[in-house]
Image (spheres, rainbow, N blue to C red):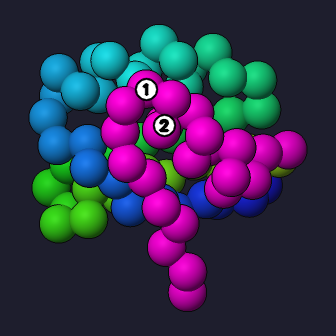
Amino acid sequence: MNVIVLKTNIRYKKELKAIAPVLDTVSGITRWNVALDDSDKILRVESETLGARDIIAQVNALGFRCEELLN
């Protein structure tokens, strides 16, 4: 299982509600969450088949910014 860690500009619960229907239905995403209490609003995605670029494209298409955090 790959864990993809991304910095976003998702700040509010209502914004989570806007992205949830899409991320919940993306084939390949096992689990995801956004840490709204973190300063970088971290989006963590678990997937066997998708990479950071795939997730970034989905989030950007919804009108939010997203970038990969590298170790």
Q: Say which amino acid is labelled 1.
A: Leu
CB within 8 Å, label 1 to label 2: yes
Report crowding for label 2: few under 14, some 14 to 19, many 20 or more residues within 10 A (C-alpha).
many
Q: Is residue 50 visible?
A: yes
Q: Pointer 1: what residue?
A: 62
Question: Total number of numbered labels?
Answer: 2
Write the residue at 48% across / 38% down. 60
Which type of secondary structure does the marked residue at label 1 adopt? loop
Tell me where residue 3 sits by quadrant: bottom right
Q: Residue furthest bottom?
A: 71
Q: Position of residue 36 (x, y in %)?
A: 20, 49
Range drawn in magenta: 49-71
Which residue is depicted at the point 23% across and 27% down?
15
> Which element carries disc 2, helix, strand or loop?
helix
Q: Quadrant of the C terminus?
A: bottom right
Q: Residues within 10 Å of mark 1 (few under 14, many from 20)?
A: few
The answer to whether 33 is drawn above or below residue 63 in the figure is below
Classify residue 1 as left or right of residue 68: right
* Nearer to the camera, 62 or 20: 62
Above/below status of 44 relative to 63: below
